[in-house]
Image (cartoon, rainbow, N blue to C red):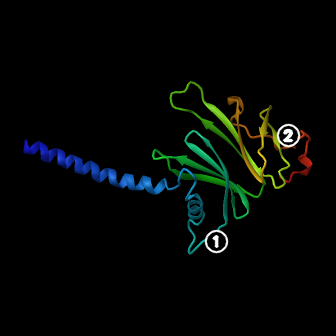
Amino acid sequence: MPKNIIKWTLIAAVLLALALPLTVSYLEDYTIGPDNSGLADRVDQWMARGSRGTTDNQIILYDFIDVGWERYVLADLNGRLAMLQLRKGITGRYKLESYSAGSANFRQETVFYDPLFARDSTFYFLFGGRNPDSRIASVRVVIDGVEYTVPVAPGEQFLSCIEIGAETSAARPDPNLTVFFDAAGTDIAHLVER
């Protein structure tokens, strides 16, 4: 009997010794709260990788959209519009997976959602940007020959999401066919700075 107790105690100690570093590592990665608290600090750390001293990054977080276990956040990083991609962990907290930023006033992303045990996967098109005078009410994009209308909520920035067909999921919208509309349905593409 004592040999069994010692054996199981040793096994438990080994498992604990293996699990502890993994748990600590997991908790260090998933530092962003469900309300995006800590995200600006994490982005600042990410942007400062490889540099010495303090950073002076200006980070403004706007809107976000959740697609499955992924969260997409529209942000301003030092005056450049960015799309941040976060991954949700089992604790409900998030980690920063990647980001893309540029000088354009709009960001777009095609995302794939495959829920566990689902028969069909779903594809989404995210479109976000600056709308300083809230003039843009909707955007028409053409992806692989298929036309989609993206609604835009009033505000200085927006992030919208629509479901798209699987046949168009890998393609990017044709920028020459993208049209911006106001609330009356008038084409205002000539007034929008891209």
Residue count near mark 1 (Cα–Cα under 10 Å), binned few <14, some 14–19, many ≥20: few
Q: What residue type is disc 2 on?
A: Leu
Q: Is residue 174 left or right of residue 91?
A: right
Query: Where is 52 relative to 108, above or below?
Result: below
Query: Which numbered marker is on residue 177?
Result: 2
Residue count near mark 2 (Cα–Cα under 10 Å), binned few <14, some 14–19, many ≥20: few
Give 66 or 127, whichever is nearer the viewer: 66
Query: Where is 118 relative to 102, above or below?
Result: above
Residue at the spot of label 1:
56
Mark 1 or mark 2: which comes first in sequence? 1
Query: Where is 52 relative to 184, above or below?
Result: below
Look at the image and tell me whether residue 17 can be seen: yes
Residue 192 lies, in percent from the top left, at 87, 51
Residue positioned 33% across, 54% down in the render: 20
Query: Which numbered marker is on residue 120?
Result: none
Residue 65 lies, in percent from the top left, at 64, 44
Look at the image and tell me whether residue 106 can be seen: no
